Image (cartoon, grey):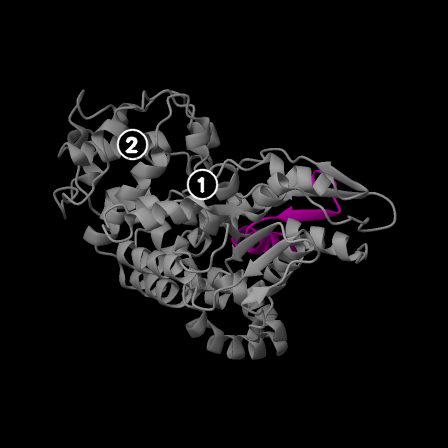
Amino acid sequence: MQTSEKSQVPSDDLKPAKESNFLAQNPHLQSLEISGFDPNNPPDPKLIDTCVHCGFCLSTCPSYRVLGKEMDSPRGRIYLMDAINEGDAPLNKATSQHFDTCLGCLACVTTCPSGVQYDKLISATRHQVTRNQERTFSDNAIRTLIFNLFPYPHRLRPLLVPLFIYQKLGLPKLVRKTGLLKKVFPRLAAMESILPKVTVDSFRDNLPEVIPAQGEKRYRVGVILGCVQRLLFSPVNEATVRVLTANGCEVVVPKSQGCCAALPEHQGQAEQAKALARQMIDSFENTGVDLVIINAAGCGHTLKEYGHILADDPQYREKAEKFAANVKDVQEFLASAGITAKLNPLIDGDLTIVYQDACHLLHGQKISLQPRQLLQQIPGVKLKEPVDAALCCGSAGVYNMLQPEVADELGVQKVENLLNTGAELIASSNPGCSLQIKKHLELQGKQVTLMHPIELLDYSIRGVKLLRK
């Protein structure tokens, strides 16, 4: 996939609809299927008008970097939203594809000097696309699989048995070597390529509902386990609980909690997202916790958006705002509360670590310094910074399954930048990012340890030493 030369000036075929006939200038959009957005929360024209078309977003937009097309940039998509609002362009397959290519990484929100709330614009647009745009059979099939499986651990867990057998028999190497699955079902192949190792721990759910603090109790906090996280990244959850209790936190883990709603919300599945958000709020309502702690970046961003997600729900609106205000990323919380447990070296001598910024932590929650500050408290840790640290790795929730070609190019770039630091270990705060990075490390034949920062803190507190590769 070739990246074309970028321009900081809007291309001629993307002049604002008010200055030219957008549809006449873009004949490939004229296959009218739907006249425009429906009246249910379309992209707000006032938010659209805050964009001054300066182009600062272009250099930070991952989809624009890869595809090189104006309409696959934040500025181009805003032009398109405006044109559809004004009736100068249809909401059809041709226009929807440009909204689908957006990773939702929010780098443009961080970069924009005009404060354009692109996150709210793309969210409203994706809900419109989901409601009003017909998709192909294969697209519907993969989306149905994702949204009816991943957010529900009780549905996903039984499928781990055949996946466990599949991996034990060594079939992944055979499947990937033949390349047949990629040719016949490219999106299914993309899903298979990031499949984490299924272990015996994946079948256990052994955290008690209340875990006492070690020493003097400083806080009573709730911990969210996640959906995929609790099954395939259970060591991260267990490390989170150990670190919190070691630092004076009584931990509450409600058994009734489910998915945080990140996957459906980011892809415009509004009703499913609302239902999952209500379930999460209910599960923590009478627990008496001071704060709700999350250790996955994408989940954390969505949890903090519950007030927006349930803004139209009179029964849950206030509950959602209160819940969201009490959500803290585990690194955000620990950096503020302070580490009281003794930290020990992870190896004999110095250990060089590169921290991978997850987009929904960096751009969505504005959390960047805290993970680095915590890692630097571990004796012997030397922190490296990669080039293009703010560029998305291509995971973006389920983006690497729905848009595998763009995701793969971004994954290659990300891994090269991380490796070029010469670090011995990569610290990643999001399960999706970790899977994407591990995939491209393997494709490049590199053996570099990748761990969540909370796992490193857990090892340090317990005095567990890492083995150098």
Q: Residue at x 43, y 59 (%)?
A: 284
Secondary-structure class at tag 2: helix
All told, the count of numbered labels is: 2
Rendered view: 441 above or below 387: below
Q: Which residues are magenta?
A: 419-444
Q: Which residue is found at the position 72% from the left and 38% from the top?
A: 383
Q: Residue at x 40, y 53 (%)?
A: 262
Nearest to the observer: residue 14 or residue 227:
227
| Rendered image: mark on residue 105 | 1
Q: Nearer the viewer, residue 145 or 286?
A: 286
Q: Name the residue: 66% across, 42% down.
A: 338
Badge 1 marks a residue whose secondary structure is loop
Q: Is residue 270 magenta?
A: no
Q: Is residue 346 above or below residue 190?
A: above
Q: Nearer the viewer, residue 64 or 164?
A: 164
For label 2, the residue is: 78
Tell me residue 447's x, y (percent): 72, 55
- Confirm whether the magenta stretch covers residue 433: yes
The vertical placement of 426 against 115, above or below, is: below
Q: Earlier in the sequence, mark 2 or mark 1?
A: 2
Asked if residue 444 can be seen in this view, the reply is: no
| Local crowd size for mark 1, using a 10 Å CA cut-off: few (<14), some (14–19), many (≥20) | many
Would residue 450 be seen by someone viewing this image from the given angle? yes
Q: Give percent across and percent down for residue 288.
A: 47, 56
Q: Amino acid at mark 1?
A: Cys
Cα distance, mark 2 to mark 1?
16 Å
